[in-house]
Amino acid sequence: MHNFLLSGNSLKNAQNPALDAEDEALIDIPLPRILVVDDEALIANTIVQILNRSGFIAEAAYGGQEAIEAARRISPEIILSDVLMPHLDGVEAAIAIQKFLPETRIVLFSGQAATVEILARARARGYHFELLAKPLHPTQLIKHLRNV
Amino acid sequence: MMEVTPYNNVPVSVESQNEEHLRLLIETGLLLASERSLDDIIQAALDAGLHLCGAKFGAFFYNNVDDNGEPYRLYKVVGLEASAFANFPMPRPTELFNVTFLGQGIVRSGDITLDSRYGHNFPHKGMPKNHPPVRSYLAVPVRSRNGGVLGGLLYGHPDANVFQAASEGLVATVASQAAVAIDNVRLAESLTHEISLVDAARALQRETADRLRLALDAEQLGTWTWDRATDLLDLDERAAYLLQAQPHVPITRTALRERIVTAEDLASTAQSLQDSLATGGHYSAEYRLDAPNNTHTWVSASGMATYAPGSSTITGMVGTVQDISGRKIQEAALRQSEKLAATGRLAATIAHEINNPLEAVTNLIYLSRTDPDVPPAVQQLLETADTELARVAQIAQQTLGFYRDTTLPAEIDLNDLLQSVVDLFARKMTSHKIACTLDLEPGLCIHGLRGEMRQVFSNLIVNAIEAFTSVPKAGRLHIRGRHVRGRRNGVSILICDGGTGIPAHARQRVFSPFFTTKQSVGTGLGLWVTRGFVEKQGGSIRFRTSTGNPAGTIFRVFLPVNLPPMAHPMHQTSPGFPVE
């Protein structure tokens, strides 16, 4: 019943009629590739679907290690990652990815207070990441990701 | 006494000798009467005695008691080097010496070596080796006025039968003069000693009193005494100051209590005294006093019961009183910070639990409502669901969102921000029949944390909307924004509602955590969080309210511009919850 939850093919979705006129204008330029990382598959998948409908080529990863592998493979322009995840958290994965993809924009998003300390640790190591708070409405997310 | 042979080898007329003896006796008497040094008294008596009896040498042994109460003898000698006796033991309580040192009488012997009491005692069997030879011997006890023996004057001569009966009388006179002088010295010594004891006691008393005063000062303690029979209190200056009374002007405890203790604590102060009187124990009470401007002073009073002599009847109390307002404020602050810490933990836990599902549901609704296959009627329903979900997120953020704004300060356009917050609550205002007007000067910009500022105005606008809850007719909410130029440049935002106003009893506490007038729907954190954010920004928040006619409340928020130390595009704050 939740077909639309699957991470879909980007180009087809990019032409989705739901897009507004502003989005149409973007079709001529190369679509930004974005890796969406969240251990909650429902969140990762819905965001991927939303972004694919909104002029991005999005792909999901469900953990830190998986995110690093996917990043090597697809070299995304943007990584949108949850922070608190088992095994390898979003900040550690982001730092690892930033080392081999220094140009990639990394946006963290989290619903937890503990994020503050994790982010402070990253800052102490010289990494400044953007942070978005969950819950974030899709329109707000799209707007933020389009702002360079 | 022995038979005495006259000692009269030098031809001296009896008259002139008597006259000389008499003169010497008088002079010695005068000298001893004026002398205050024990050494000099003994020396003078010894010298006079030597001359009066014609001895070759003499010694005075002086009974004394040391500081430990042990008896010992001092001595002085005449006609000999002092060192001549240095190696001899002190006279022991032999039969012969006891006569003198126990004050049994005078011993006069023409030849002591022939005395039946002489030479029986070990180890010397008479005089020690190298002792100057003694045959004529005269020993006179020196008796105190009180009958005690002060010591003895002992004279000797190597020849036999030197001391005559007259000599015995003369030496006895000198001995009694010496006794009086020694008694006087002892009396003076004991008086001096007693005076010094009294002085020491007074000094100790002064020191104790000073220490007590310092201790009372250090603790800012006032003291009081209370008489049970009359109910009268006596207060020292500090106690009087604390208890708003006159020092040392009697006032009954009941009258004072009723005048100064707050109504809430009147019953407990009466009870605490009754309890301590009943148990006879320690009295201790903390209570509030009415102070100007509707404030309170907290005081702590403690006391101990005083009893009638030899009885278990409590006659009153003595105690201290202290201002403990500072401690009470600290305690309240501590309780508040404990509540705050608990709230923080609760917020983090709840945020953890609800933010992820909220994100997922928001995404799902968005996907559904933007699906072109969904009929318009269903899309309309989903849009409503989306708006309601935004409210859930708003509520979560309003109470739990205060930890969230973690990014660096950025330029905030308050015109945009206020407009977006108003837009967020547009639906809610419509349902409450509230018309909202904005009057904002252009370019109201400050530098700060955007999420926190959004929270501040969201909270104030939500409160303004809720102020209309019990107002049936249509209301008006007005938001005015102005630049403020002066000592500190900034922005002033007024949020004015025509709601019910804040009741008088609630005005003092609206900024306190966990204070709410909204019963079941309020968390009591909104304004507390709001003020926290405003003050963190270096601003201030005040309000004016009226429950009369016209009723309403105006909150004024002042925010300083806070020019950024440096701007960096990567450090832009993220937006808070969405505004569509």
Image: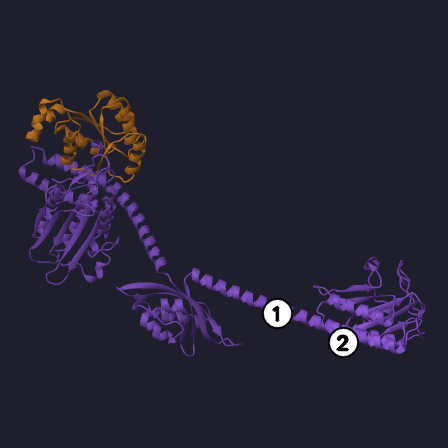
Chain colours: A orange, B purple
Query: Chain letter of disc 1?
Result: B
User: Element at badge 1?
Assistant: helix
With respect to residue B4, does A138 lie above or below? above
Specify whether residue B104 is in view: no
Q: Quadrant of residue A86?
A: top left
Q: Nearer the viewer, residue B424 or B164?
A: B164
Q: CA distance from mark 2 to mark 1?
A: 26 Å
Q: Examine the rendered structure and indicate whether residue A53 appears above or below residue B247.
A: above
Chain under callout 2: B
* Viewer-closest of B176 and A32: B176
Residue at image x 28%, y 65%? Answer: B292
Q: Which residue bears the numbered disc 1?
A: B195
Q: Residue type at mark 1? A: Ile
Q: Give the mark nearest the N terminus, 2 or 1.
A: 2
Disc 2 element:
loop
Residue B259 visible? The answer is: yes
Left or right, residue B419 beside residue B93: left
The image shows residue B289, relative to residue A6, as above or below, that is below
The disc label shown at residue B147, or none: 2
The quarter in which the C terminus of chain A is drawn is top left
Quadrant location of the N terminus of chain A in the rendered image = top left
Q: Say yes or no: labels 2 and 1 on the same chain.
A: yes
